[in-house]
Image (cartoon, rainbow, N blue to C red):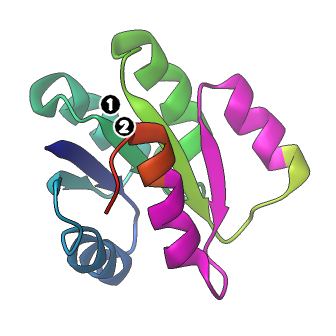
Amino acid sequence: MTKILIVDDNAQVRTALRVCLELNKGWTVCGEADNGQAAIDMVPRLKPDVVLLDYAMPVMNGVEAARKIATIAPQCSMLLFTMYASEQLAELAHAAGVRAVVSKDVGGMSALVDAIEEISGSAA
């Protein structure tokens, strides 16, 4: 079972992601956080396989959180799911330990599922 932690400041986005991701056999959402610092605090306790991070959040953005998560849980795979996808952001994210950057545009959910399958080694 692949455990996924969803980190997004928008509760509606977190709910939609949970519903969509849990349709995939073998995946479970182990928790939700509304900012990067909350995610850092949850990772040691929840031990997710995948952390799905938004970029723009209060308290701490997704790239800053990824840097810290990479040090406390190096086995954890991280994805950035953002409205602000760009080459520059992707470079920053990859340097912080993020495995993939996926845009929240049209078709974003399908691309997100594909990215989680790829980094977790689990097919939906």
Q: Position of residue 15 (x, y in %)?
A: 24, 78
Range drawn in magenta: 89-115
- Residue occupying the point 50% across, 46% down: 118
What secondary structure is found at the residue carrying circle 1?
helix
- Count of marks, rendered view: 2
Residue plotted at (26% across, 48% down): 4
**Residue type (three-letter) at the residue carrying disc 2:** Gln
Q: Quadrant of residue 36?
A: top left
Using the numbered discs, state the Cα–Cα distance from disc 2 to disc 1 in whole angstroms. 5 Å
Using the rendered image of the protein, determine whether residue 22 is visible from the camera's viewpoint.
yes
Q: Name the side, left or right, on which 40 lies relative to 66.
A: left
Q: Amino acid at mark 1?
A: Ile
**Depth check: 103 or 58 in front?**
103
At x 47%, y 19%, the residue is 70
Residue at image point 73% right, 24% down: 95
Within-10-Å neighbours for mark 2: few <14, some 14–19, many 20+: many
Q: Which residue is mark 2?
A: 37
Residue at which label 1 appears = 40
Q: 67 above or below 93?
A: above
* Farthest-out residue, right: 87
Give the side of residue 71 with respect to residue 7, left or right.
right
Within the magenta stretch, is there residue 92? yes
Q: Is residue 61 shown to the viewer in this render?
A: no
**Which mark is in front, 2 or 1?**
1
Q: Position of residue 16 (x, y in %)?
A: 31, 82
Q: Nearer the viewer, residue 89 or 2?
A: 2
Residue 44: name its quadrant. top left
Residue toward you, 10 or 52: 52
Magenta span contains residue 93: yes
Marks 2,1: beta carbons within 8 A: yes
